[in-house]
Amino acid sequence: MDTYFAPAAKATEKDLKLEIEIVSNNPILTGLLHSVSGLLAILDEHRQIIALNDSLLHMLGIDNPEDALGLRPGEVLKCIHADTEPGGCGTSRMCASCGAAISIVASLEQDKPVERICALSARRDGIKMEMALLVHSQRIKIEDNRFVLLFIQDITKRQQRAALERTFFHDINNMLGALVVASEYLAKHQNLEMANTIYQISLRLNKEVSIQRCLTSSESNDYVPVWDKYSTITIFKDMQSFFMNHPVAHGKNLTYLNNCPEAWIRTDIALLHRVLTNMILNALEATKKNGAVKVWLDRTDNFYIFKVWNKQEIPLKIKDRIFQRNFSTKEQDGRGIGTFSMKLFGEQLLGGQVSFSSSKKEGTTFRFALPE
């Protein structure tokens, strides 16, 4: 039988029954099928399903497992290309670029695990749907028979989110680029304070989007710092302005103890603002009403050290996780980024040192040390 990619031949009914019996009588494979919570199927060397777990059955909407036995993955997944050729799944022209087909065939031929992303176009109940599946194939041998362990992960939402993020950042960067150019022109040719303010805000917004992309991707090398010298007095004024009417500071005593003489620090101001605001936000969130939070700057021989103090002690059981991404003492989704970003921006991008100390007697002090 003709094929554009994988062999079209299928097992005879007798051989298929024997293969199903071999797998069903193997305690390791049956244990695996019952213990793995993800989507798992076992294929024979003809790429036909001879066993699958409950998670995959549920995903496929199949009540009776026997309805899936003997079929190929594309056939149970309702791939729109599975029946375009007489040989079925794996034999059409489109199958040559199918991640699932490539993964299965390659693992059979090479006897090693192969992982690919499958862009699946399926039709179920008359409705066409697009899915992204991460397919991992591993060949195994039992009683001189070759089988394939097929692990499937539905990454449709993850792929959609990544595509939306790329599109968003691409489009927003184009718009911000135009805004920065226009506001710069306005500031240069109109002697108005408001024009310069708009220009400065557009610059900060443009930087903020770049920082956010860095956080989203977790790749610090996506962001290129812009270095300049800034006055410590200006930095403290920026913090005071930011928290003056901030909701989390309401009813709390936020004090700036800038005893250090004015100095000039070489830094990326947008990243420094991010680190300092997160330090102060964490302290304010941990502080009860009428409680105190103190911010100040120390200087050693080689470092300027920004410090933020509050009275509350960090419990011992979470101290080791303070800087771990996605860890948070709060239950809402999307938490656990603030302290993680301190390390990411403060150390990897600004070259400083982020640390903290905490005790019942001394309270909690976060420190960000920047080299001179």
Image (cartoon, rainbow, N blue to C red):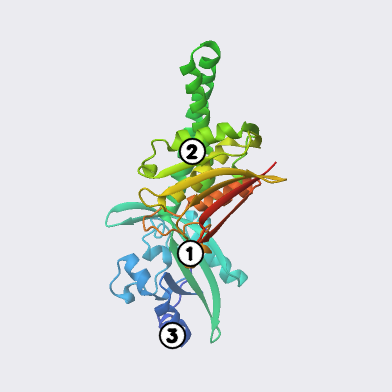
Q: Answer whether residue 178 is visible to the viewer in this image.
A: no
Q: Position of residue 67 (x, y in %)?
A: 32, 73
Counting every numbered tag in the picture gives 3
**Residue count near mark 3 (Cα–Cα under 10 Å), binned few <14, some 14–19, many ≥20:** few
Q: Which residue is mark 2?
A: 169
Q: Can you give x and y, in whole percent of width and height, for residue 196 in the image?
A: 51, 19
Task: Check contact, mark 3 vs mark 2: CB within 8 A.
Answer: no
Helix, strand or loop at mark 2: helix
Tell me residue 192's x, y (percent).
Answer: 49, 13
Q: Which mark is residue 318?
A: 1
Q: How far is disc 3 from disc 2 in space, using C-alphas?
A: 55 Å
**From the viewer's perspective, is the residue at label 3 or at label 2 nearer?**
2
Q: Amino acid at mark 1?
A: Ile
The CA distance from mark 1 to mark 3 is 54 Å
- Which residue is farthest right? 301
Of the residues shown, which amino acid type is indicated by label 2?
Answer: Phe
First in residue order: circle 3 vs circle 2: 3
The amino acid at mark 3 is: Leu
- Compute the Cα span from label 1 to label 2: 34 Å
Between marks 1 and 3 in the image, the one whose residue lies nearer the viewer? 1
Q: Residue at x 32, y 68 (%)?
A: 58
Mark 2 surroundings: few (<14), some (14-19) or many (≥20) residues within 10 A? some
Of the two numbered discs 1 and 2 on the same chain, state the one appearing first in sequence: 2
Q: Is residue 272 above or below residue 143?
A: above
Sequence-first tag of 1 and 3: 3
Looking at the rendered structure, the secondary structure element under dot 3 is helix
To which residue does mark 3 refer? 18
Instruction: Establish if 336 lies above or below 16.
Output: above
